[in-house]
Image (cartoon, helix red, strand yellow):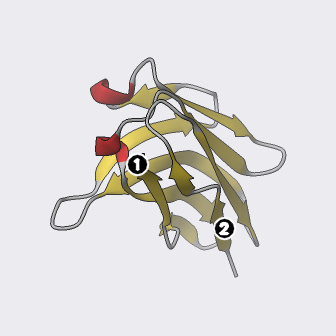
Amino acid sequence: QVQLVESGGGLVQPGGSLRLSCAVSGSIFSIYTMGWYRQAPGKQRELVAAIDSGGRTNYADSMKGRFTISRDNAKNTALLQMNSLKPKDTEVYYCNAIYSDRQGVYDYWGQGTQGTVSS
């Protein structure tokens, strides 16, 4: 059984930083892409950043320069470093992993972690 564990959310003042971590464990052959998405109440979930197994990254335009995604393939973890945070970054952040096992390819989501930017 596959598990995806997120951590690192919390409360930070405007201009501050948060680092989110996502760890995948279980019977996995390969993880293709890991990514972070976010969702505010009443809005659609949107991409924050994603990284593939080769280290290629993709960022939403509004996150470029402030957020950095990285990955440790040996540990099946992805980190999202968020700097210069603004109140509008207050959302629930979800980790996503696209992985394969002996039976197929799957798209797996975490439970979400709240990030709040407020003074």
Vertical arrangement, residue 47 with respect to residue 116, above or below: above
Residue at the farthest left position: 42
Using a 10 Å C-alpha cutoff, classify the residue at mark 1 as few (fewer than 14 neighbours), some (14 to 19) or many (20 or more).
some
Residue at the farthest bottom position: 1
Badge 2 element: strand
The residue carrying mark 2 is 5
Check if mark 1's residue and mark 2's residue have beta carbons within 8 Å.
Answer: no
Which one is in front, 39 or 70?
39
**Seen in the image, is 68 located left or right of residue 62?**
right
* Residue at image coords 67%, 74%: 3
Amino acid type of the residue tagged 1 in the rendering: Ser
Task: Report x, y in % for residue 109.
Answer: 48, 67
Between the C-alphas of marks 1 and 2, the distance is: 25 Å
* Residue at image coords 64%, 55%: 8
Amino acid type of the residue tagged 2 in the rendering: Val
Q: Which mark is residue 118?
A: 1
* Residue at image coords 26%, 59%: 40
Task: Tell me which corner region of the image, top left, top right, bottom left or bottom right, holds residue 19.
Answer: top right
Task: Tell me which corner region of the image, top left, top right, bottom left or bottom right, holds residue 45.
Answer: bottom left
Task: Report x, y in % for residue 35.
Answer: 50, 46
Indicate which label's residue lies in the foreground, 1 or 2.
1
The total number of labels drawn is: 2
**Seen in the image, is 77 located left or right of residue 66?**
right
Q: Which mark is residue 32?
A: none
Vertical arrangement, residue 24 with respect to residue 38, above or below: below
